[in-house]
Image: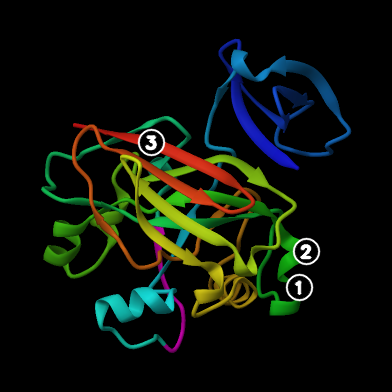
Amino acid sequence: MRLVRFLVQGRPAYGILNDDEVVELDGEGYGSPTSRRAIHRTAAVNFLAPFVPTKIVAVGLNYRDHARELGMPVPEAPILFLKPPTSLIGPGDAIIWPPMSRQIDYEGELGIVIRDRVHGIAPNEVRDHILGYTCANDVTARDLQKKDGQWTRAKSFDTFCPAGPWIETELAPDDILIETFLNGERKQSSRTSQFIFGIDHLVSFISQVMTLLPGDLIITGTPSGIGPLKPEDDVEVRIEGIGSLRNVVKK
C-alpha cells in the first residue's frame, strides 16, 4: 500500500494512492485505511512529503562500499546525527542552495517511517513499529561539513531533506536496489544488504537513545558514489519496490 500526503483545494490531506486516483482518508494522519472521505484524480492533487516528523534521525557511514570508498574503518556502533524537520521537502520541490556554501552533495538513502511511539525496543520488535519505507536524499553542504568538523550546519539547511514520493507499507527492505541519478546519469548503485547495521539493529539502537514518535523519519546512510550538485541539476533517488524521488537544485 502506498500512503501519501497531498494538497487538495489548498489543504493538506492523507490518503492511499491507487494508480491514477487517491483515496482521501478521514481525520488527521493515516489512521484506519478503511475510514475514507473522498476520491481524487492523481492529476488533480499536489503531493507533499508523506509524513510530518518531530525529528529526522540520520545514520552516517552505514554501507560497506561507502566505508571502502572513504578509506574509513567500519564503525563499531551506528553514527547518529539529526536533521531538523524544517529541512524536509517533498517530491518535485526545489533544493535551495544556501549562500554560505560553495559545495552541496547528494546522498541517496532509504528512509524508515515510524508508526507509533516507541522507546527501548528490542531488535525483534522493530518491524511492528515501522509504518513503511520511502526514498530520501541527505543533501549536505560538504565544504561546511569539513570546515566545522561536525555535521549540524552542513546537514540542516531548509530543503536539505527531500523525501517521498510516498510511504510503501508492503516492502521487504533487507536486500533491495538503491540508486541515485544526476541529470539522468547513474551515480550511486548499491543494495541494502550492504548495510553495516541492518534495519532492526538501527531502529532498536536509536530507540535506546531517544523516544521515536509517529511520523518520525530515520534515514539509513548512503552508498558509495556521493558527489556534488550544481544549480538546475535534476537529482533522482530510485529504490526498488518504492519508486522515484526527483528534485531540482535552485540557487
Location of residue 203 (image quadrant): bottom right
**Mark 1: which secondary structure?**
helix
Q: Residue furthest right?
A: 34
Which amino acid does the dot numbered 3 rest on? Answer: Asn
Q: Position of residue 52 (x, y in %)?
A: 56, 41
Q: Nearer the viewer, residue 41 or 200?
A: 41
Report whether 18 appears left or right of 67.
right
Label 3–label 1 contact, CB within 8 A: no
Could you tell me which residue is drawn at 70 percent across and 22 percent down?
20
Q: Which residue is mark 2?
A: 128
Label 2–label 1 contact, CB within 8 A: yes
Q: Position of residue 111 (x, y in %)?
A: 54, 55
Spatial CA distance of label 3 from label 2 is 31 Å
Could you tell me which residue is drawn at 28 percent across and 45 percent down?
157
Sequence-wise first label, 3 or 2: 2
Q: Which residue is mark 3?
A: 247
Select label 3 or label 2 by which is in front.
Answer: 3
**Mark 2: which secondary structure?**
helix
The magenta span reads: 76-82
Q: How is the image coloured?
A: rainbow
Sequence-wise first label, 3 or 1: 1
Neighbor class of circle 3 (other Cα within 10 Å; few <14, some 14-19, many 20+) is many
Is residue 63 visible to the viewer in this orientation of the structure? yes
For the N terminus, which image quadrant?
top right
